[in-house]
Image (spheres, helix red, strand yellow):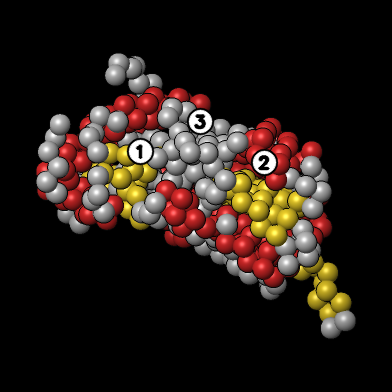
């Protein structure tokens, strides 16, 4: 494949300590980015600097350190709002990750507005984070969970959604990018169709936030969730975006310090959003790290990242299809850089183990998407790309798969 690559991944890797020689670390080709991304120096230093020089609780202290911590924390919220084009920072709620963000919506909005006989639509490709909260809500509220099945090539049929939508549909929950199939779903069109039927739409952006521009106003989603650690940021920090009008109607998800205006024996007055949904001490350092991660992404350019990863994905698709006995799942072409595959009858865990001996790190298993795994026939191996990967990494993966074939007695054709 001949292509002019628009970014220098080797130069980008210099910004990541994980890829530098160190006596405690093996030098690996890291292709498990759908599970978590590596962290650049800028993120690590931002978090370390806060803990070393500005550590204090937010929105409480009557002293300078507390004021500075509050300023940095709210600056991170404003940065997230700008990054996803929310209308205002108050539409950004900090959580511990995508999972907590979606649980917040299911518990707060769902238990308030979903009733017996109502319907929730989920896709067959959802990660458990965007499936189990809705399964539990349906069970608790006597609602009906409807499954939007995928096509044989791993896509969603919009006409099938129209057939599922009824006047009792309250929500459509959909991943922007599948963490198994790499499918990029047309979330703006899905939200439009959900709204036309009187339903809301929640988008799980965990696998898209670091790889393409996201504009919540253009998508017109009602809720959107993502995790910092899949966008070169820290673990333990996530974002729930929700339209302000919805947040105002939703009761608190948890209760405790910092989320109330008035507490009396006879009266409680909750704080305004987003504080209403951030009980207790929030992930302050982690939010500051997320701010730095978003700055890192924009320093490269989201359009440039999307273009480069599209080029790299096309190269990976070509090389993977050259491997005998390899079955690749998901759309070809038009997909994100996530590749679930099997190799003959070799167990995916064995594939990952042999690849690890060749210093190629991938994932194997059901990828927290058990119903999809059942549809695909079981566990798969999965390689996934990020901005610091390049064609040499893809070539190393292909060479390592040749080693898997040799170890398990599959001759190269």
- Location of residue 145 in the rendering, given as x and y in whole percent from the top left corner: 66, 57
Quadrant containing the C terminus is top left
Q: Residues within 10 Å of mark 1 (few under 14, many from 20)?
A: some
Task: Give the label on residue 304, or none.
Answer: none
User: Looking at the image, is 221 positioned above or below residue 379?
Assistant: above
Rounded to the nearest angstrom, the CA distance separating label 1 from label 2 is 26 Å
Identified at 57% across, 38% down, the residue is 156
User: Looking at the image, is 321 positioned above or below residue 102?
Assistant: above
Front of the two marks 3 and 1? 1
Along the line of sight, which residue is nearer the eye, 176 or 6?
A: 176
User: Looking at the image, is 101 positioned above or below residue 201?
Assistant: below
Q: Secondary structure at mark 1?
A: strand
Task: Give the label on residue 302, or none.
Answer: 3
Rounded to the nearest angstrom, the CA distance separating label 3 from label 2 is 30 Å
- Location of residue 265 in the rendering, given as x and y in whole percent from the top left corner: 84, 83
Quadrant containing the N terminus is top left
Along the line of sight, which residue is nearer the eye, 74 or 198?
A: 198
Q: Are marks 1 and 2 in contact (CB under 8 Å)?
A: no
- Location of residue 208 in the rendering, given as x and y in whole percent from the top left corner: 51, 40
Task: Give the label on residue 328, or none.
Answer: 1
Q: Which residue is mark 2?
A: 161
Q: Earlier in the sequence, mark 1 or mark 2?
A: 2
Q: Residues within 10 Å of mark 2 (few under 14, many from 20)?
A: some
Identified at 34% across, 16% down, the residue is 4
């Amino acid at each position: 494949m001949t292509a002019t690559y628009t970014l220098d991944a080797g130069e980008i890797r210099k910004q990541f300590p994980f890829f530098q020689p160190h006596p405690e670390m093996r030098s690996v080709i890291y292709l498990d980015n759908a599970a978590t991304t590596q962290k650049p120096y800028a993120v690590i230093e931002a978090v370390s600097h806060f803990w070393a020089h500005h550590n204090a609780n937010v929105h409480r202290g009557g002293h300078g350190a507390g004021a500075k911590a509050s300023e940095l924390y709210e600056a991170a919220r404003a940065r997230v709002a700008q990054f996803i084009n929310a209308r205002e920072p108050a539409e950004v709620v900090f959580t511990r990750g995508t999972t907590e963000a979606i649980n917040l919506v299911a518990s707060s909005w769902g238990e308030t507005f979903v009733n017996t006989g109502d319907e929730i639509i989920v896709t067959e490709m959802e990660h458990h984070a965007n499936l189990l909260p809705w399964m539990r809500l349906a069970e608790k509220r006597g609602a009906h969970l409807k499954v939007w099945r995928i096509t044989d090539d791993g896509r969603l049929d919009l006409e099938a959604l129209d057939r599922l939508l009824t006047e009792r549909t309250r929500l459509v929950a959909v991943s922007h990018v599948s963490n198994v199939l790499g499918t990029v779903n047309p979330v703006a069109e899905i939200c439009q169709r959900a709204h036309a039927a009187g339903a809301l739409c929640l988008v799980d952006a965990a696998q898209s936030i670091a790889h393409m521009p996201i504009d919540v106003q253009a998508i017109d989603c009602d809720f959107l969730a993502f995790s910092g650690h899949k966008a070169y940021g820290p673990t333990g920090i996530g974002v729930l975006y929700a339209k302000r009008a919805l947040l105002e109607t939703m009761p608190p998800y948890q209760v405790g310090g910092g989320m109330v205006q008035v507490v009396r024996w006879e009266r409680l007055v909750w704080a305004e959003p987003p504080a209403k949904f951030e009980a207790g001490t929030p992930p302050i350092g982690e939010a500051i790290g997320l701010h730095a991660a978003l700055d890192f992404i924009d320093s490269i350019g989201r359009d440039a990242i999307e273009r480069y990863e599209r080029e790299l994905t096309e190269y990976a698709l070509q090389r993977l299809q050259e491997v005998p006995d390899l079955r690749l799942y998901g759309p070809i072409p038009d997909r994100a850089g996530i590749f679930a595959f099997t190799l003959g009858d070799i167990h995916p865990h064995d594939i990952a183990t042999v690849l690890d001996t060749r210093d190629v790190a991938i994932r194997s298993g059901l990828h927290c998407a058990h119903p999809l795994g059942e549809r695909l026939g079981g566990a798969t191996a999965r390689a996934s790309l990020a901005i610091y990967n390049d064609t040499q990494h893809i070539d190393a993966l292909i060479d390592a798969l040749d080693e898997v074939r040799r170890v398990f007695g599959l001759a190269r054709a």
